[in-house]
Amino acid sequence: MFEIAKQRLEPVFNHIDINEEVISRLSVPKRSIIANIPVRMDDGSLRVFTGYRVQYDDTRGPTKGGIRYHPKVNLDEVTSLSFWMTVKCAVAGLPFGGAKGGVTVNPKELSLLEVERLSRGYIRAFADVLGENRDVPAPDVYTNSTIMGWMADEYSVIARRQEPSIITGKPLHLNGSQGRECATGQGALFVLNEYARHRGWEVSQKTVAIQGFGNAGYHFARLAQTLGYRVVAVSDSQGAIYDPKGLNVKDVFRYKTENSELASVYCEGSVCNPLDYQTITNEELLTLDVDVLVLAAMENQITQLNADKIQAGTVLEIANGPVTPQADEVLESNGIAVIPDVLANSGGVTVSYFEWVQNKAGFYWEEKEVVEKLQKIMRREANLIFDLAQRYQCSLRTAAYIHGVERLAGAIDQRGNSKLFNSSK
Ligand code: NAD
């Protein structure tokens, strides 16, 4: 997966002149750490879970990236995600490098107390390499604000001081930021709106299907519906629902969460719970004839195997890496535009940055201020990328990578390169 992730850099080097030293720096992570985390289970037994933290590049600032709990987490996946975080923070113009973490676990099989012990164990395992000016984690798939609160608390016990800026995505009452919960969905919608403005879309005429109905997918669906987009299908890991007339997103969410056994941490219900909507498979959702297909679940969802069946006019990547490079080529040749992850989902890390700034300042902003600042950044970076795509006649993905890599290359170069050191001999 990491080798495939890096293929995204190749077209960038065809368009802009990047020095060899930058290429070698961006080809490998700075630091990868694996730790085995012992957890006492409720029945008294001991289980050992494998955890990862990859700090890909910190040239532009402390590394930043979420922690994922999933049975498929492995070093290759975490490395790829840390690479994308590096590019994403640069694309959004944030003073952060990129990192990612994860634990190979199915958290839905654990009790709440076991999830808490695992989360505290993760921090104990990696505390030496974390820090507000070093590496700042956040939530990702199957981790959330509750877990971030436990992690921040564990870090303060180890450090013997309050240091809320060690981690972002915390609950509001534990020094979190207004607007962080919905930031990824909100940011993606700001980017889509900018794209719609360029294309002269009337949004109330536009249909949307959304794969993934978790933090990112749900808030995107809710906010998009408020703006007038017609959300016709949503899915989760158990299946999808479809209504060409449009779904009531808030009702779907209510039904999904009402069935939750672990309401405070995980939603165990499904969008397929009894509602008067037609159920379809996830694969069918991907191939619906809609204006916008939003991918907000996992990586590698559109591959060589199904790319030719995609009928949507535009694909919006809220998940990280949901379209493979081979599938990208098929979509491009079929005239389907892809708004890439490194731009579309950067609202989450942008509000995480706001949370970090507020924690360091000890001064907290109102939600309106957070949303306005987020909109300004998302609009600015989206327009810069749309302009680059025009200038280089390339895809939005290549334009986004050009944008991020130019900033990274500038930072790497300005720390000194062979030209500078050879001329000083
Ligand atoms: P989440 O755990 O809240 O939700 C994930 C959702 O995807 C769940 O509804 C789950 O049921 C669904 N899902 C899992 N496998 C699926 C499948 N095969 N088909 C359909 N649905 C499936 O996670 P999230 O925070 O919403 O993250 C979703 C994606 O967005 C991830 O790729 C994540 O890296 C990315 N992302 C999230 C944030 C954030 O702030 N939450 C920021 C940037 C990127």
Image (spheres, rainbow, N blue to C red):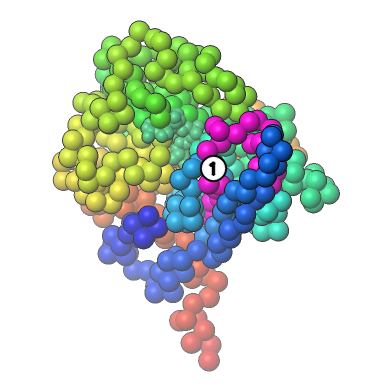
Q: Quadrant of residue 76?
A: bottom left
Who's the residue at 30% across and 48% down the image? 324
The percent position of residue 7, horizontal first and vertical second, equals: 32, 59
The percent position of residue 90, horizontal first and vertical second, equals: 48, 53
Q: Nearer the viewer, residue 50 or 345?
A: 50
Judged from the image, the secondary structure of the residue bearing numbered disc 1 is loop
Q: Is mark 1 within 8 Å of ligand 1?
A: no
The percent position of residue 260, horizontal first and vertical second, equals: 55, 19
Report whether residue 138 is seen. Answer: yes
Q: Nearer the viewer, residue 409 or 32?
A: 32
Q: Quadrant of residue 59?
A: bottom right
Who's the residue at 47% across and 61% down the image? 408
In the image, residue 122 sits, relative to residue 319, either above or below, namely below
Residue 373 part of the magenta segment = no
Q: Nearer the viewer, residue 337 or 371?
A: 337
Q: Is residue 289 left or right of residue 148?
A: left
Q: Is residue 155 left or right of residue 10?
A: right
Who's the residue at 37% across and 55% down the image? 1
Residue 99 part of the magenta segment = yes
In the image, residue 318 sits, relative to residue 133, either above or below, namely above
Q: Which residue is mark 1?
A: 105
In the image, residue 23 sits, relative to residue 236, either above or below, namely below
Q: Quadrant of residue 262?
A: top right
Q: Is residue 406 left or right of residue 292?
A: right
Residue sticking out furthest to the top = 276
Q: Is residue 161 left or right of residue 142?
A: right
Who's the residue at 68% across and 54% down the image? 125
The magenta-colored residue range is 94-123
The percent position of residue 68, horizontal first and vertical second, equals: 53, 43
Give the amino acid type for the residue marked by disc 1 in the picture: Val
